[in-house]
Image (cartoon, coloured by chain):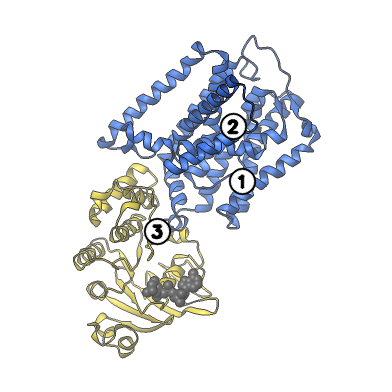
Amino acid sequence: MALLEVRGLSKSFRGLKAVQDVSFDVTEGEILALIGPNGAGKTTCFNLIAGVFAPDRGSVRLAGTDITGLRPDQVCRAGIGRTFQIVKPFQQLSVEENVIVGALNRLHDVGAARERAREILEMLGLAAKRALPAASLTLPERKCLEVARAMATGPKLLLLDEVMAGLRPTETDHMVGVFRRLNEETGLTILLIEHVMRAVMALAGRIVVLHHGETIAEGGPGEVVRDPAVLECYLGEEAL
Amino acid sequence: MSGPRRAAPGGRARVLLGLLLALLMLLPFVVNPYLLSVLTLILYLAYVGQAWNVMMGFAGQLSLGHSLYVGLGAYVSAALFVHYGVPPALGFLAAILVALVFGAAIGFLAFRFGVSGVYFALLTIAFAEFTRIGFDHFDWVGGSGGFFLKVAQRDYNDLVNLRGSPEMFYYLLLAMTAGCFLLCHRLMQSRIGFYWLAIREDQEAAQAVGIDVFRYKMLAVMLSAALASLAGVFTAFFNNNLFPFQIFGIEKSIEIILGPIIGGLGTLFGPILGAFVLTVLAEGLRGTMEALGVVLPGVKQVFYGICLLFVIMFLPHGIWPSLRRRLGLDSDGRR
Ligand SMILES: Nc1ncnc2c1ncn2[C@@H]1O[C@H](COP(=O)(O)OP(=O)(O)OP(=O)(O)O)[C@@H](O)[C@H]1O
Ligand SMILES: [Mg+2]
């Protein structure tokens, strides 16, 4: 049984079919990448999984339990952590407090949550900024904070929405290293949306490609990047 | 809050607060009756400001109708006392209960049906106004003609029936304000406080980290309402007369929120400092005008407006955050 089972997910916005009949599995311990051109429906997929909208059709199961139509906080407590493509830090709280709020999802004691927050900030290389208000961070740092806060909720499955966008190549490599280590050491399962192919190729065991809300390809990184349909609509000739 | 690095400013803040409390406890022995009445007013505004701050400053829900809860607390406890002889020492529980019911009703309506921001604020005004009109026609408690408590003996202090000297009322209010401050302090160091701030900052992000936003907003509204209702109990027995247009009026709601805004929204000490600054300046102005023999109706409201304008323009976060920095108390978060 897969950790996450997405079946026939569909969602329209005022007639616009943002996601159409999308199905895929995320196996426990794997890193799966969701890629596709702008407006393909990737973020909408995340929002459907995370409970921001209820799907028009289809279902989402986490570790065998149906979580379709649950509220975002219920989905989080069920074990899915997510980041936002357009970052949403708690601006006036410090970096550490942002992460503490996440950690309080599993740890009800503030002291314990603070400990956990510090560990996570250390791991992500954000420890030096922990006392600063989140509003003072640069965009890459905010992306990093999104990851820290989502990780702090103690998820079984982490949904990452373009967290590498805007990072310099060395920063990307650092993040890739962090996720790879997390995945290997703690067995954290990751579903990521990413345009930075360098990161996708380094991390993903499998890739699902969306286009106009539909799945057009699925498979290992090697196959997918040579798939003619994918090359045509997304990666282009020169991409790799 | 924790860790050795933070212990120093936290400790200093504690010492300063202790000194302030000691000062406030000693003042009644040295001040004249007029100054005592001013101090009482300051504490009153500090207390209701703190109550309102729970909802707006911490959880980010703007109530412009907080006089509703004050008024309900006042009428419930006064009516129980006058009609059934129930002492306020018991009646306050009924006052809290009624405020909780109203707070829950407003919260439920708003948060279940996605009423937020300006519309939420309008809803709170509407509730306060409807209730005012209701009480205008509620003859059991005197309607618009007012509801009066017998002004009884002042020779010994009776805390159970809240009959006694101005000093007794002052100390009661001091205890209430200190208690409310401590309660808020504890809450802000707990999971609840962190969750409120998260909701205030970004509701969607708060939900995404597992916060049941509805539940925590309800908690903020109900706690804020309950605390405000106690201010009403105090008012009823301190003033001995209640008029719907006065106690439920929008002016009263505005007066409640000025202190925390000027002192510093969402801070623990802001409402107290704001109440002090506003009252001292307003009384100073009144005294000056009296001395000059000038009579200008509405000058207090205009003055409040000017204070607000000044703070918004020069200290958008209120006086306390910048003062706190100068006092070197800053590394301790939102004290
Ligand atoms: N809340 C919404 N209301 C209306 N339309 C929406 C909403 N969210 C997404 N859409 C539309 O659905 C389509 C898919 O958007 P989505 O954000 O899922 O794409 P994406 O694959 O994440 O794109 P990108 O790579 O640019 O982030 C777009 O046409 C978008 O305009
Ligand atoms: Mg997107």
Q: Residue under circle 3?
A: A88
Q: Where is residue A151 drawn, in percent x and y?
A: 33, 58
Asked if marks 2 and 1 fall on the same chain, the answer is yes
Q: Give the amino acid type for the residue marked by disc 2 in the picture.
A: Lys
| Residue B49 against residue B111 in the figure, above or below | above
Between residue A78 and residue A132, name the one nearer to us: A132
Which chain is indicated by disc 1? B
Tell me the quarter of the picture where residue A150 sits. bottom left
| Number of numbered discs overlaid on the protein picture | 3
Q: Give the amino acid type for the residue marked by disc 1 in the picture.
A: Ala
Dot 2 or dot 1: first in sequence order is 1
Which chain is indicated by disc 3? A
Left-right relation of B161 to B276 = right
Q: Disc 3 and disc 1: Cα gap in Å?
A: 29 Å
Q: Residues within 10 Å of mark 3 (few under 14, many from 20)?
A: some
Q: Residue under circle 1?
A: B104
Helix, strand or loop at label 3? It is loop
Q: Residue at x 71, y 40 (%)?
A: B132
Q: Residue under circle 2?
A: B300
Left-right relation of B189 to A186 = right
Asked if marks 2 and 3 fall on the same chain, the answer is no
Tell me the quarter of the picture where residue B45 sits. top right
Helix, strand or loop at label 2? It is helix
Chain A visual colour: yellow
Q: Which mark is nearer the camera, 3 or 1?
A: 3
Extreme residue toward the left, this view:
A170
Q: Is residue A19 something one can see in this rendering?
A: yes
| Residue B26 against residue A55 in the figure, above or below | above
Q: Residues within 10 Å of mark 2 (few under 14, many from 20)?
A: some
Chain shaded blue: B
